[in-house]
Image (cartoon, rainbow, N blue to C red):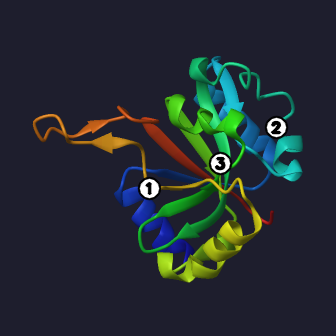
Amino acid sequence: MRERFQQAAEAVGAIMKQFPSMPEVRTYLADLAGGGGVTATLLPEQILGGLDGLITGNDDPAGAALCISFASAGIAATGSLLIDLRAPDRRAAAALAPKHAVFLNPATIVATLYDLGDTFRDILATDDQAYFSLTTGPSRTADIERVLTIGVHGPKELHIIVVEGA
């Protein structure tokens, strides 16, 4: 399932990277930011702890060079990511930064969107602030004279991060 997900994600322009541990991830993310600000959506403590002060731009998501998120699931058929964006103050971060890095646990990859039916039902039934995104590749549009343009309505780059054994 993981290979199928990676093929689908890369086919739509995402970059999928695998790392042995968080120190290598932190270095990779710092390089992606290129000295610019780093913002984040809600992250699990295990990931947040491994980023050691890298996140600096949560007060100004519009000025951040990189946004970091965590995917609740991946969809192998399309290479899509289910991202929890229920925190209103962090929602803009995923759309404004030119680069978006998303952590994915390969154990959460399902074959199709239909396999997430129970997940969606649970999210919508238990949280009156439910808000999530299905993200597939970098932002793209062809609504201006049918010319494909990357990054007009969101990040120009989508990096999917897998940490081995995490």
- The local crowd at label 1, few if under 14, some if 14 to 19, many if 20 or more residues have their Cα within 10 Å, is many
Q: Position of residue 151 (x, y in %)?
A: 38, 34
Looking at the rendered image, the disc whose residue lies closer to the viewer, 2 or 3, is 3
Give the residue type at disc 3.
Leu
Residue 101 visible in image: yes
Q: Residue at x 78, y 47 (%)?
A: 43
Instruction: Find disc 2 in the rendering and name its residue.
Output: 51
Helix, strand or loop at disc 2? loop
Q: Position of residue 116 (x, y in %)?
A: 58, 77
Q: Residue at x 49, y 69 (%)?
A: 5
Give the residue type at disc 2.
Leu
Q: Earlier in the sequence, mark 2 or mark 1?
A: 2
Give the residue type at disc 1.
Thr
Work out whether residue 59 or residue 14 is closer to the camera in this orientation and state it.
Answer: 59
In the displayed structure image, the side of residue 99 where residue 118 appears, left or right: right
Q: Earlier in the sequence, mark 3 or mark 1?
A: 3
In the displayed structure image, the side of residue 30 where residue 52 appears, left or right: right
Check residue 164 in the rendering and tell me which mark sits there, or answer none: none
Instruction: Find disc 1 in the rendering and name its residue.
Output: 136
Q: What is the distance, in whole Å, between disc 2 and disc 3 at their CAs?
A: 20 Å
Whether 139 is drawn above or below 58: the answer is below
Instruction: Find disc 3 in the rendering and name its residue.
Output: 85
Q: What is the distance, in whole Å, between disc 3 and disc 1 at their CAs?
A: 15 Å
Helix, strand or loop at disc 1? loop
Specify the quadrant that holds the N terminus: bottom right
Residue 28 visible in image: no
